Image (cartoon, rainbow, N blue to C red):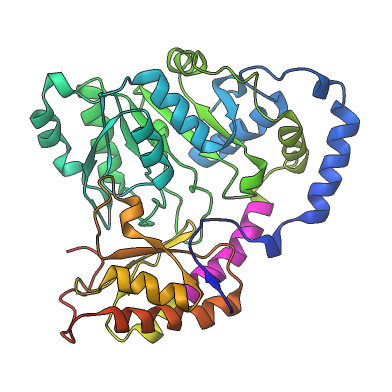
Amino acid sequence: MRTFDFAVGQTNPETFPIERVQDAANRAIANEYAQLTTYPGKLGHAGLRAVMAKRESEREGIQIGADELTLLNGSMQAVTLTAEAFTRPGDTVICEELTYSGTISAYRSLGIEMVGMPVDEDGMRVDLLEATLDELGEARKPKFIYALTTYQNPTGTNLSLNRRRQLIDIAASRNIPIVEDNCYGDVHYDGEKPRSLYALSDYENIIYMCSLSKILAPGMRLGYIYAKPRLLETILARRHDGGGNYLAAAVVAELYKDGLWALTEELNDSLKVKKNLVVDSIREAADGICVSSNPSGGLFVWVRFPDDVDQEKLLRLTSERGFFYASGANFHIRSEQIPYLRLAFGHVPDDDIRDGIPVLIQCLREARTSNEKPSFSTLYD
């Protein structure tokens, strides 16, 4: 049976720069074989840290030093280490009500109480934050606020500039750290890239996470944290693994030694084609039964469907027909069965997008328990 796998967020294997990575690996091994016989330490490969510092400096317009970054095994290690450093079981963290399923799992395993903020077309509802903090009171004051500010997973939204500034102001006034996860920020298609929180303010309690999983390959397992020395030292005190993958870091440093933007934009071009195929295919097939996002970056399209869809039946129908997606409940901090699903398109062949989306739409129709016209016309109302 033919399958259509839109479940997992991955990059496009068809455009992976095989020869360039092979050449970079040959140079890295020849030049750094001696360093491969030692432990890389808590900060990691100096050359890649310099490249990532340049990445941040060029994107954000402020100077970042290589020694202000620590390399990690993907951004999820950053998520987990930060939570371990600043929380204990029973502590409270504020995050988007809809957020990355990996973060939800990590926080649950650490016994963290997640307090969710609603999300709309402008990202986290920061306008509700102060009332939420007042309700929590001093006894449940959050240890930090976690936010996917750019091309948010799963919704694809961007936190608006006004809300970014408001988030910083509220956090600073109450002395609450912010953990900004920007792992999708350079998977960019249209418009200007939103500025990261640390570039908008001198507030020192911002911990910033980024990754190479989305602009190159998740199998490289390379991410990093940028933070002021006091915060960075607190996080690194929780690190006991002897450092990250030095070989992977050396290879990527060679690959990007002349700059990363040309290759990143080249790979993004193919991803934009896929995103547009998903959005256009839904628009053509849906006939009012659902609406979707049209994100300006990232790897996901967020789909809203009628409340009367029987989600168990939908899962059964799609599985029988080889269509796989991620249920909205996977991204809800309380696992609520919301009438949404996420489509990950980065690794899906173009023909599978064209042929697969009509399969999903037909399954949505068959899983409904009424023939009433859907009561919505947008993703959020």
Does residue 168 sit above or below 302 in this rendering? above
Q: Is residue 333 left or right of residue 127?
A: right
Q: What's drawn in magenta, residue-wise?
A: 263-278
Residue visible at 61% across and 24% down? 66
Residue 271 part of the magenta segment? yes
Report the predominant secondary structure element of the magenta stretch. helix
Q: Is residue 282 left or right of residue 380?
A: right
Q: Is residue 112 left or right of residue 194?
A: left
Give coordinates of residue 294: x percent, y percent: 39, 67
Give coordinates of residue 139: x percent, y percent: 14, 19
Residue visible at 59% across and 63% down? 347
Q: Is residue 61 visible?
A: no
Q: Nearer the viewer, residue 335 or 279?
A: 335
Say which quarter of the image contains residue 246: top right
Give coordinates of residue 63: x percent, y percent: 54, 28
Q: Nearer the viewer, residue 251 or 330?
A: 330
Residue visible at 44% across and 12% down? 230
Dividing the image into 4 quarters, which one contains the C terminus?
bottom left
Q: Is residue 283 visible?
A: yes
Does residue 369 sit above or below 112 in this rendering? below
Say which quarter of the image contains residue 191: bottom left
Count of number-bearing discs: 0
Residue 53 part of the magenta segment? no
Give coordinates of residue 312: x percent, y percent: 31, 68
Dividing the image into 4 quarters, which one contains the N terminus?
bottom right
Looking at this view, name the residue that lies furthest to the right.
Answer: 30
